[in-house]
Amino acid sequence: MSQALLIPVKELANAKHRLSGALSPQERRDLAWLMLKGVLREGALLAGDVRKVVVTSYGPAKELALDLGYEVLSESRQVSESDSVDRASAQLEREGVEGVLRVPLDLPLLEVRDLRRVLTMSTEGMATVLVPSADGDGTNALYRAPPCLFPSRFGPGSLFLHEQLAREHRVPYVVEPLESLALDIDDEGDLRALMAQQRNCPAREYLEKAGLPERLHKIAAARGGAEFRAKSDS
């Protein structure tokens, strides 16, 4: 079965703006870049018969992907992640790819064993494999066979939407929680979850050196004080 790993990458100029309360713009860019490198390096460990593809308009990401042996699908514009994934999936399907696994760039703990697990499940008869985010709301990995089986719906509530689409198309699917795919970094709560991990990774080490634990402690203390004053005034 012809399969592909697909990683969409948007411009990192204003990456992770939801982390602006804890990290500076440069720190957010650095963090996104470190996570991207980690995801691409793990993906590059997949067997050679799995096509490895990055879809992006971001020049540095193209260079990194090519250096690691990926194919690059260049975009002239970026409408949304779902749009990028679906257009790239359609091109891969036209080229004979039978199944596509999409993963995001912001998985600091990703391990190739979990990518292999998803691809193996697909060859065991699953037309769709959904790997949920840690909060059970998002879709941190989406496998579809064929690649254009149904449209992507990334964003809030995407896991429910993807399950609904799989049922509507009457295809066998599975929701499979996988440890290294569970944590994606979108908000301050995700940063706290990453810092609480027992295992190290480049993103966590970077944040440790940047003094994030102390920052998060001060943010929590300030919020606690504000909530106490608000209750006292009411």
Image (cartoon, rainbow, N blue to C red):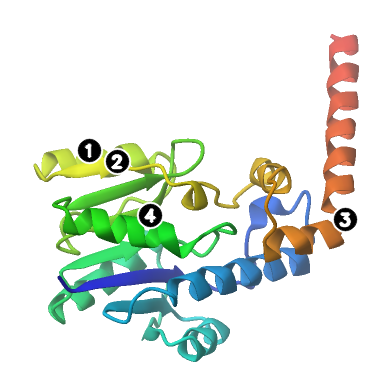
Mark 4, residue position: 141
Look at label 1 and name its amino acid: Gln
> What's the CA distance linking mark 2 and mark 3?
38 Å
Image coords of residue 177 (percent x, y): 40, 42
Image coords of residue 128 (percent x, y): 22, 51
Which comes sooner in the sequence, label 2 or label 3? 2
Q: Residue at x 43, y 44 (%)?
A: 138
Look at label 4 and name its amino acid: Ala
Q: Nearer the viewer, mark 4 or mark 1?
A: 4
* Dots 4, 3 in contact, CB < 8 A: no
223 is higher (above) or lower (below) than 25: above
Image coords of residue 101 (percent x, y): 31, 63
Look at label 2 and name its amino acid: Leu
Mark 2, residue position: 161
Q: Which quadrant holds residue 123? A: bottom left
Q: Which mark is residue 211?
A: 3
Which comes sooner in the sequence, label 2 or label 4? 4
Is any part of residue 86 visible from this angle?
Answer: yes
Determine whether the residue tagged by mark 2 lies in a helix, strand or loop.
helix
Look at label 3 and name its amino acid: Gly
Q: Nearer the viewer, mark 2 or mark 4?
A: 4
Q: Which quadrant holds residue 231? A: top right
**Front position in the image: 187 or 123:** 123
**Front position in the image: 148 or 172:** 172
> What's the CA distance linking mark 1 and mark 2?
5 Å
Determine whether the residue tagged by mark 3 lies in a helix, strand or loop.
loop
